[in-house]
Amino acid sequence: MIGIHRDGRARLRSPLYPSLVVGSARVSSAGRGVATSSFLSLTCTASLVLGCGVGIAQPIGAGPPLEGAVVELTAYSRTSWATNSGTTASDYQSEVANMFDGSFTTKWLEQKSQSPSPAQWVEVDMGVSQPLAQITLENTTSNNDANGFPYAYSVTVSTDKTSWTQVANGTGTYGTTTINFAQTTARYVKILETGTSGNWWCIDELNISHY
């Protein structure tokens, strides 16, 4: 919990021991103290660490953390994703479960060169609409899978599988491709391969995370 006191200093208090001040820093605006009351409290839902050393709250469902903040993303459990009705792929649908089995010895593999036409894509049904801010496409570097990253991609999301919104596009990287975007809420995630490469696109493990 953060208290902003009349002396213009913000004090970070332990939620377990409210009387214990575990850090403090001066809070100012245009060179003036901004405290307008004797004490303003804020309950933390996720701890951020800023350059001044004060932890502040990142509300659940909010967008990316403040610039300069450090916060960990949390990956969702993927237990039912493989069998949810909306999880599918452009080809080799029987192998999509390999993206969620926790093993780098199995994979979903598009067995042809990467090309925008015909379209190559995977679609994940998370079961319910929930916040998401990052997707990782992981390929082991112990074999040629690492070269199977998407040479270019587009990511769209939907809550109803009817109306889709693009949240990211870019180029993949050797081994693991990490796709970050402003946190949004969706149930369905579609990753479209939009590049051209002689390497086959493959995904050993696919994870989705939120703040």
Image: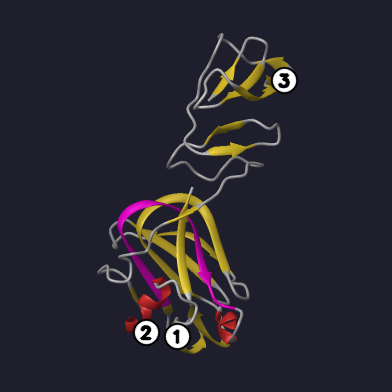
Amino acid type, mark 1: Glu
Which residue is disc 3 drawn over?
A: 30
Whether 138 is among the magenta residues is yes
User: Is there a contact, CB below 8 Å, between mark 1 and mark 2?
Assistant: yes
Determine the residue positioned at 45% across, 82% down.
106
Amino acid type, mark 3: Ala
Element type where label 1 sits in the image: strand
Element type where label 3 sits in the image: loop
Q: Where's residue 97, x and y in %?
A: 36, 76
* Image mark for residue 131: none
Q: Nearer the viewer, residue 38 or 152?
A: 38
* Image mark for residue 91: 2
Q: Nearer the viewer, residue 37 or 157?
A: 37
- Mark 3: give few (<14), some (14-19) or many (20+) Cα within 10 Å: few
Q: Secondary structure of the magenta portion, mostly? A: strand
Whether 161 is among the magenta residues is no
Which residue is disc 1 drawn over?
A: 110
Amino acid type, mark 2: Asp
Q: Quadrant of residue 51?
A: top right
Q: Quadrant of residue 126?
A: bottom left
